[in-house]
Amino acid sequence: MAAKKTRIAIVGYGNVGRGVRAAIAANSDMRLQGIISRNPERVRAELPDVPIFRADDEKRWRARLKADVAILCGGSAEDLPDQGPYFARFFCTVDSFDTHADIPDYYKKMNAVARRAGTACIISTGWDPGTFSLERVLADAFFPGASQYTFWGRGVSQGHSDAARRVQGVKDARQYTIPIKSAIDEVRSGSRPRLAARAKHKRRVYVVPAPGADYESIAHAIKTMPKYYADYETEVIFITANEMKRSHAAYPHAGFVLSSSQTGRGNKALIEYRCEWDSNPEATGGILVAHARAAHRLRRERRTGAFTILDLPAAYFSPRSARDLLANFV
Amino acid sequence: MAAKKTRIAIVGYGNVGRGVRAAIAANSDMRLQGIISRNPERVRAELPDVPIFRADDEKRWRARLKADVAILCGGSAEDLPDQGPYFARFFCTVDSFDTHADIPDYYKKMNAVARRAGTACIISTGWDPGTFSLERVLADAFFPGASQYTFWGRGVSQGHSDAARRVQGVKDARQYTIPIKSAIDEVRSGSRPRLAARAKHKRRVYVVPAPGADYESIAHAIKTMPKYYADYETEVIFITANEMKRSHAAYPHAGFVLSSSQTGRGNKALIEYRCEWDSNPEATGGILVAHARAAHRLRRERRTGAFTILDLPAAYFSPRSARDLLANFV
């Protein structure tokens, strides 16, 4: 165990930021050093005992916030493309940048900044991208040519909920991604089918309509929305604001990666990695905090630049000593 | 992709050795360079086109066998404690030393020899110890205090089959380890029970009795055998030699690690890693060969000594380029 705690800054205090805070509290070698927010008053009201800094007050947080690692909890669309390279100049960072197509560019940018600044920045982690990426690479390495299937759900997708919320007449919306059981069973049997998007997942949207809204046209607008819904069987269910609050306040999620292959003469070899979270932001927080431990270790070893979960030995995530791991976990 | 193939030597050609050979054939960046065996005539008869070396003819294989990595396929009880340190002097090695209590000592010995020899030796890998160790460490790092459960089966345990075979009056025996469904369901529900050995697994032994053997005393001797059977509910089933050959020639196995934890205020966080092999030796072979790729890379980076799966980034196992992994797997 490191005698000195790893000092963490949280950048962005929404659901994931709260999850990270809970995870820091669960790790005795970690300390929350402060929070950087665009809305410091709101955060201060929630956390009166934590140093809170206004994001644009760079001078103040550079002078007062002594952190080993900043965990960037902003969104991939709006926040991280700028926040990542910006904060990488000042701190080792961990983020969950998840716009898959843009990851190589983001890596390049982060790597350049971090090398120049002498920081270690772990990008695109959490569970997908993150642990699911790791499992895809491992199973692909063990069984070349394996067919890989990723299923998500049952759980809330923030992006799909937001998209439904933008439809006219929608006051609030919550989207559940639901994996289709027959597809799961087929894949688990080892049969290696080709599965279209709609064969793997369906979507269920709970909508609180605005007063006087037209239900038919809301349902139609959601179900035909390109990219988000058009490729799936989508069910739209209208509920009251009270019901939304009572039954859909949590952010559960789940998912699994299944790698299906054959060895020798047609012998089945299956690997399934599955996770199930009552609270997606809290579980994600746990994974991000373990990455902060790894980033801090990289920095102490003077290894700088951008990294992904694929570059990190499992031992780097663990608070345990090499001796403990060897004796009790191998 | 490396232009030059990694040249593999197999040491010990039993079930796992055969599995490794099949896995080398499935990996286009690997080449089987030769086999070292205590019984070269038998292996030569099976593989007329592969260079076979007698284990004790050190002079000959040192002169003629140019391998980057030797995969040691001997047993943990009799072979590896000597073979590991011996071959680590000449080759980078990969082995599946699985006597859990002795792993720290074995690591120490291998580390000393490998450092002196300038080789990279990955010990105690496969699926358990191996990928299961990795998953235990990751989940423990993400969710400190997680309760972890490892279940094995349904599948053949070589050690338990051998033990039953040593009972007087037993001509042949095959033992299946069977996980108990109610225990699995309980653990998957997130309830975190304490489970005694007999609550997790039961054992079924198929026995071919010698002519005139006493069935009752065989069954009694097996069921009361300390360490192997006494702590479990054990079923003994007598069959003919033909039936053994027809129905129990394969070596299927399976198992999973389940980590059960809570985040925040009592929110369930579960991770399950499950594998299912029609052929345990072939699947193990696939994992060992990916480790040979990692050992070769460590050696090229002049990192020498002993390593476990916990010390290795996932990218080291993969034949894919960093660019490919970043673009298509993260």
Image (cartoon, coloured by chain):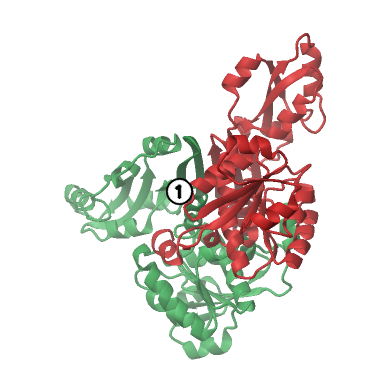
Chain colours: A green, B red
Between residues B293 and A269, which one lies in front from this camera angle?
B293
Quadrant containing the N terminus of chain A is bottom right
User: Would residue B195 appear left or right of B191 to someone viewing this image?
Assistant: right
Q: Residue at x 75, y 25 (%)?
A: B165
Is residue A273 among the parts visible in the rendering? no
Count of residue discs = 1
Is residue B193 among the parts visible in the rendering? yes
Read off the residue under disc 1: A255
Q: Is residue B181 above or below residue A41?
A: above
Q: Is residue A118 above or below residue B296?
A: below
Q: Is residue A129 above or below residue B46?
A: below
Q: Residue at x 55, y 83 (%)?
A: A118
Q: Position of residue A282 (x, y in %)?
A: 52, 59
Question: What subunit carries mark 1?
Answer: A
Q: Secondary structure at mark 1?
A: strand
User: Would residue A103 appear left or right of B209 to someone viewing this image?
Assistant: left
- Tell me where residue B162 sits by quadrant: top right
Between residues B265 and B213, which one lies in front from this camera angle?
B213
Q: Is residue A207 above or below residue A312?
A: above
The amino acid type, in three-letter code, at marker 1 is: Gly
Q: Residue at x 61, y 45 (%)?
A: B257
Q: Position of residue A271 (x, y in %)?
A: 51, 44
Q: Position of residue A120 (x, y in %)?
A: 54, 76
User: Would residue A329 appear left or right of A55 to someone viewing this image?
Assistant: right
Q: Position of residue A174 (x, y in %)?
A: 35, 53
